[in-house]
């Protein structure tokens, strides 16, 4: 049954939610730029790694249109957390907007997958936060609409601005990847294994092995899942985490052939903003202190239910929850926020991460 909310919309519980039909799209699946960063750490091992890493960095597409631009009222740069006692001043956290845009001829496209990758100031953790594509938000200059409409109206720039205005937090960089690249990347790492919490037409509950087109099918499926697009986004986050964990294994780092294939695929399948220079990526990589998958937290931006607006099935934003999330992003306290909300959110939705 639905329940009323203050603005008169009818909000439906998860089992009542039915997404509107939509044409087949690519998943717009994104890979965290830190995948490159993790591998760059190995550049000092032998000359081969250094040469291959430099070649990969040089081959990354850099696009000025992805670079976030200033505008009146843009959130200020995030400052480092204040040191305690005799601590040395830290680094500011970094926010990457990860988007995958599906475009077809004659169509500007929409951001079919949207995440923020938050790198903590101490560089010891990364948080992947999904922003469900049906979130009903204010799109600057366009009025209210689904968050993924921002891409259709104004491309990456308006998508970033919409996120910044929604959260009050500055986004530093933008990364995108295409779905063909995603398939090739899972092939390059030799496939990944994740835990699937739900039986569906294509995948049984339990551990599933994913590679190539099977991996693509896994992150595309949503109509057969209990929470629709929310569960699809959960699957996307867990596969990203599984890929990063695979990149950290000795089989990848210590094998020159595998290393070459993986870092080449990472570089060849993504586009980044033009401020992510070789020097920037290398310096960020060398500052990272990610040692295992436990340093990567997965969650989604808070919503409080579902509604229908003008015939559109939408996700109703939990604005109090977003304000708390925004405070954690800007204050570099995501560790505390995740400890409080991360597992509780997944348990509420019936989502579980792959077991150790």
Image: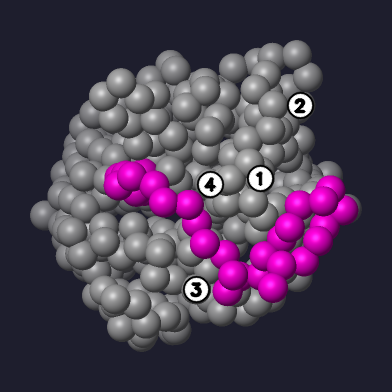
Residue 296 is inside the magenta segment:
no
Q: Kindly report which numbered mark, 2 or 4, lies closer to the viewer in this rendering.
A: 4
Q: Kindly report which numbered mark, 3 or 4, lies closer to the viewer in this rendering.
A: 3
Of the image marks 2 and 4, the number of the one nearer the N terminus: 2
Question: On the rendered image, what quadrant is the N terminus found in?
Answer: bottom right
Is any part of residue 119 visible from this angle? no
Please provide percent x and percent y for residue 218: 31, 65
Of the image marks 3 and 2, the number of the one nearer the N terminus: 2
The reply to whether dot 3 and dot 1 touch (C-beta < 8 Å) is no
Please provide percent x and percent y for residue 27: 34, 48
Q: Who's the residue at 28% across and 30% down the image?
A: 104
Of the image marks 4 and 1, the number of the one nearer the N terminus: 4
Residue that carries the numbered disc 1 in the rendered image: 309
Compared to residue 161, the image places residue 34 above or below, namely below
Residue that carries the numbered disc 4 in the rendered image: 133
Classify mark 3: helix, strand or loop. loop
The quadrant holding residue 137 is top right
Which portion, as a residue range, is magenta?
1-29
Colour pattern of the rendering: one colour
């Amino acid at each position: 049954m639905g329940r009323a909310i203050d603005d008169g919309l009818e909000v439906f519980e998860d089992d009542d939610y039915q997404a509107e039909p939509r044409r087949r799209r690519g998943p717009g699946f994104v890979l965290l730029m830190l995948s490159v960063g993790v591998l760059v750490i190995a550049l000092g091992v032998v000359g081969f790694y250094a040469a291959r890493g430099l070649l990969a960095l040089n081959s990354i597409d850099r696009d000025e249109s992805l670079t976030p631009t200033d505008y009146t009222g843009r959130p200020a740069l995030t400052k480092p957390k204040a040191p305690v006692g005799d601590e040395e001043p830290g680094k500011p956290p970094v926010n990457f907007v990860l988007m995958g845009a599906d475009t077809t001829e004659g169509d500007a496209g929409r951001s079919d997958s949207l995440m923020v990758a938050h790198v903590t100031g101490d560089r010891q953790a990364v948080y992947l936060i999904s922003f469900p594509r049906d979130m009903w938000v204010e799109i600057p200059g366009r009025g209210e609409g689904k968050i993924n409409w921002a891409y259709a109206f104004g491309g990456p720039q308006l998508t970033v601005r919409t996120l910044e205005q929604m959260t009050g937090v500055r986004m530093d960089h933008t990364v995108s990847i295409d779905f063909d690249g995603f398939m090739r990347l899972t092939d390059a790492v030799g496939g990944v294994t994740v835990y699937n919490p739900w039986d569906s037409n294509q995948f049984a509950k339990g551990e599933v092995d994913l590679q190539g087109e099977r991996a693509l099918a896994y992150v595309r499926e949503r109509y057969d899942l209990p929470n629709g697009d929310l569960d699809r986004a959960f699957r996307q986050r867990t596969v990203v985490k599984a890929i990063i964990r695979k990149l950290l294994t000795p089989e990848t780092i210590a094998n020159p052939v595998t290393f070459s294939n993986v870092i080449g695929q990472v570089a060849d399948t993504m586009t980044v903003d033009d401020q992510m220079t070789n020097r920037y990526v290398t310096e960020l990589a060398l500052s990272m202190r990610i040692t295992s998958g436990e340093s990567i937290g997965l969650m989604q931006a808070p919503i409080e239910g579902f509604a229908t607006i003008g015939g559109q099935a939408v996700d109703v934003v939990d604005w109090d929850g977003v304000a708390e999330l925004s405070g954690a992003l800007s204050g570099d306290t995501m560790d505390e926020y995740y400890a409080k909300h991360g597992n509780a959110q997944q348990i509420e939705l019936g989502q579980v991460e792959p077991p150790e």
